[in-house]
Amino acid sequence: MKSKNDISDIKTKKEKQSKAAKDMWVLRLYVAGQSPKAITAFANLKKICEEQLKGKYSIEVIDLLKNPQLGADDQILALPTLVRKLPVPVRKIIGDLSNTERVLVGLDLLPMS
Amino acid sequence: MKKVESKLVSTNLLKSPTGIQGFDEITGGGLPMGRPTLVCGSAGCGKTLFGIEFLVRGATQFNEPGVFMSFEETNEEITKNVASLGFDLDYLVKHKKLALDHVHIERSEIEETGEYDLEGLFIRLGYAIDSIGAKRVVLDTIESLFAGLPNQLILRAELRRLFRWLKEKGVTAIITGERGEETLTRQGLEEYVSDCVILLDHRVTEQTSTRRLRVVKYRGSMHGTNEYPFLIDEDGFSVLPVTSLGLNHSVSNDRVSSGITSLDKMFEGKGYYRGSTILISGTAGVGKTSLAAHFSEAACKRGERVLYFCFEESPSQLMRNMLSIGIKLEPWVNKGLLQFQATRPTFYGLEMHLAKTHKLVNDFKPNIVILDPINTFVIGDKEVEVKTMLMRLVDFLKSNQITALFTNLTSGVNELEHTDVSISSLIDTWILLRDIELSGERNRGMYILKSRGMAHSNQIREFNLTNHGVELSNVYVGPSGVLTGSARIAQEAIENAEVLTRKQDIERKKREIERKRKAVEAQIESLQANFESDVSEAVKMINIERDTINQLEQDKIEMAESRKADIIKKKNRNPKK
């Protein structure tokens, strides 16, 4: 239970980082508690973002166990789900994000080779 | 032993009433409580509506809030769609009786990367259930997930988990599924939901469609196994358990007037039995509808309710036509005692007709139901089906103590005592109207072919339509056979003339006798007079004679006195002069 807070803490830090950039990436990760899948997904996401979008992204982690009413807004079924809110169009990636290539395709990010 | 077992089952298996008309009857109380039920069927057969109605009735009638999770339609669409059935979903949502959740999944928006589960769906559903304390859940149609999520293995595993989870939650759930090619559902959901499976069907035969429902499986409970027709109309869903209920209906000794006094007289002067089935058959234009109209009018006058199904005429046409024979039906329609239902038999299938009739009867609660005519149901070669349908209808009406009057148009002259739909054995009272062709005219004759349980008249009556209704008159039965119409009138005229001449003869004879008597009396009188005058003459003579004798005696005495002789009173002389 305490580790859940850790994730939220990270979230807030990331949010604070940079707001100025116009091509800001807003990402939302939906999870259900501290399941292994959730932790893996968050770790994978962070890694990809650091590599590809350093400094111009924010990650918001939503724990549906805490806020179940938020699930309907983004039509969440599968968990974990990563939602790219910005830039539009909205994209969804489900799974623990272990397949980096697919995540990049899903996020419409061309790998920086 | 067996009885004990079934009792145990019935106490163990709680049921959740759906509130859907008729459905709870065939399932013995509703859906299995706390378990998922699969409702499957092809497109447009009413799966969603079944689910919605289950929730709405649950919320409004049984105080069981429900969650509707839609995978196809949005909340607005659903709300709009069912508003036409009188379901106000917005109101229910507002009062926390219902939660709508639209689950939308777009394949193109989704990228799969690695392991995942459907916990999100569980959480949403769980949240919706907990937020209103739902007891009922509908998932419509969960199979859409198969189109949205590529990984079938995960999906199937998750669905299995979902149904188990629903059971653990203790909610009564309906899962709808599209009909598959060879399986009940396209994705084989019946594998996971095995407690109760309901199959909805929408079939078209001979261009008429009928919706049917069948309980394929109901674990741990007795249920009706037949296919039951159901209706979707402005009141929602109604399933009609239309199989014969058996022949154990109670009967009434009450009589109802046929509306025609002379016809009642043929039935011991009292009319038909209440709750019996009356058939009026006959060829075209013999007045079947008129008899039916008479019966309806009489019933309305008694304050009873009549449901009149006309399959060939529109109500206004029928009312106008009946007005011509002096039957006013319109006031009763306005008063709400008489209700017309005019539909072409081809409008629905037979089952649907039956279902519709059931529904109308249940709604209107009539004392009398009239079907005019029944033979229009026979289209093509469906006699057996029509018969079974009418049998069910008769049973249904009888069990409700409703007097039913059917009319039947017989086509051929040779088959008068044969109904097209061969339902004669179902009928209690059968009145046959026939036309009698005689000396260039066509008249209507009527007789009672049978009437169970009463001493009915066996006579043929002539049946006349006058401007004040139907009149029955005795036909002429005499040496020259049975005569009707003008032949009867002519024959009656001849007879009347004969009677008149006879009467006149008698009168004449009477007068003759009187005259003779008077003549005799006069004769007697004159004789008497003569006799009396003779008598008085004689008396007078006698008196004169006596006087003369007396005088002579006196003279003699005087003479003797003068001669001082002895007085001898002796009559030795004739007193005559």
Image (spheres, coloured by chain):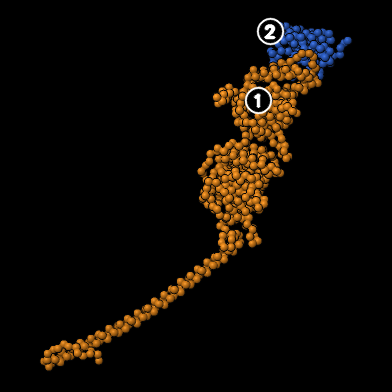
Chain colours: A blue, B orange
Residue type at the position of mark 1:
Cys
Within 10 Å of the Cα at label 2, are there few (<14), some (14-19), or many (20+) other Cα atoms? few
* Residue placed most toward the observer, B536 or B3: B3
Outermost residue, left direction? B564
Q: Which mark is residue B174?
A: none
Quick check: B530 above or below B360? below
Question: Would residue B319 be seen by someone viewing this image from the given angle?
Answer: no
Outermost residue, bottom direction? B563
Structural distance between the alpha carbons of marks 2 and 1: 40 Å
Q: Chain of mark 2?
A: A
- Secondary-structure class at tag 1: strand
Residue type at the position of mark 2:
Met
Residue plotted at (72% across, 17% down): B157
Quick check: B21 above or below B387? above
Task: Name the spot of residue B117 as percent of width and height, x first.
Answer: 74, 15
Task: Name the spot of residue B236 as percent of width and height, x first.
Answer: 65, 32
Question: Would residue B402 be seen by someone viewing this image from the given angle?
Answer: yes
Mark 1 sits on what residue? Answer: B196
Task: Name the spot of residue B151 as percent of width and height, x first.
Answer: 77, 18
Report whether B217 appears left or right of B428: right
Task: Name the spot of residue B531 as percent of width and height, x first.
Answer: 33, 81
Mark 2 sits on what residue? Answer: A1
Q: Chain of mark 1?
A: B
